[in-house]
Image (cartoon, helix red, strand yellow):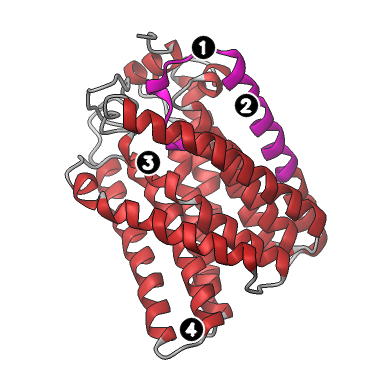
Amino acid sequence: MTPAPRSRVRSTRTGRAPLSSLGIPFGLSGLAGTWTMAAHTSLTPNIIAEGLWILAAAALIVVVTNYLRRAGYHGGSIGEDLRDPVQGPFASLAPTSALLVCTHYAQYFPIAGRIATGVFMVIGLLFGAWFLAQFALRERSIDSIHGGYLLPTVAAAFIIGQGAGTFGWTLLGEAAIAVGILFWLMLGTIILARMAFRPAPPDALLPTFAIWSAPPAVAGNAWFAVNGGRVDLVETMLLGAFVVLILVQLMMLGTYWRLPFTLGFWAFTFTAASSGTYTAHWLALWGGPGHAVWAWLAIGVATMLIGSIAVRSVALLSGRTGKPSWADPKPGKSGPCSQ
């Protein structure tokens, strides 16, 4: 078995902030996007979405600052964290969350917003390429691979495509979505094989499997941004994949319910939010009987799930007693994730 990387051991012993905590602003950004879609489809006033965007931006600043501060005062190396086979993929959530926030605020600050979005697009692209190079060059155990491996490649590419589509950068949007689909097929297959043919991941990492079902919704939202919000063959194909993969997660609810709560549950949030956004968009285009009720149901489920995780996270953090911030995810064993 490959020994635990030193950075992960050091974080366990010193309480360094894990990169997985970046899932907090990522999930809140996704929820803000869901409520923005609700406002665009005339289901709710825009003020709710704007409040959530402020919360997401504030959370991004706080979480990144907390990580950097704790990295400086609790030993270790940011470089080792980035190369860590378990924590490393979550680092992509910093530029990706910033990209989402900047894309939204570009409507109020067009020049600054577009420049900032472009900068974070480049950072996300470079990190994704570096991550894939490390994936190819550095030996790792198959048991260290988890759903978060889709974040630097698939999620980042689709969100770059969505931002590009929002600004009318059609060629960039199409290219980014193509990259996302490519690595969704490649890495998604590896992740499913790891889940199927190896011992179950520890409790701390099992929630990341929810990310495995996110790509159809994230890709669908991105393609709507690129194609002008129309239903076409691509959207229809993504909708079919979305339905099947969400059903997979519903079949696993009993397993998730029995897990001890950790901050790793933020892995559910962007899947829930992107799915709520995608569902609301499709229902608005369909416009059939009761479509508003079904849209409210999708938005409500996503909001309640993310809200409950946020409340439990506050309770968990306020009751900290110096427990490990990251467990060594050895196959077949359970342990706490970030706290």
Q: Could you classify mark 3 by the number of other residues whose Cα lies within 10 Å: few (under 14), some (14-19), or many (20 or more)?
A: many
Q: Is residue 91 magenta?
A: no
Q: Earlier in the sequence, mark 3 or mark 4?
A: 4
Dot 3: element: helix
User: Upstream in the sequence, badge 4 or badge 1?
Assistant: 4
Q: What is the magenta range?
A: 120-148
Principal secondary structure, stretch drawn in magenta: helix
Sooner in the amino-acid sequence: mark 2 or mark 3: 2
Labelled disc at residue 209: 3
Classify the position of the C terminus by image quarter.
top left
Residue 326 in the image: state x and y as whole percent. 34, 26
- Dot 3 amino acid type: Phe
Distance from Cα at disc 4 to Cα at disc 1: 50 Å
Mark 4 lies on a secondary structure that is: loop
- Label 3, label 4: how many angstroms apart (C-alpha)? 31 Å
Specify the farthest residue to the bottom. 289
Do labels 4 and 2 touch, CB within 8 Å?
Answer: no
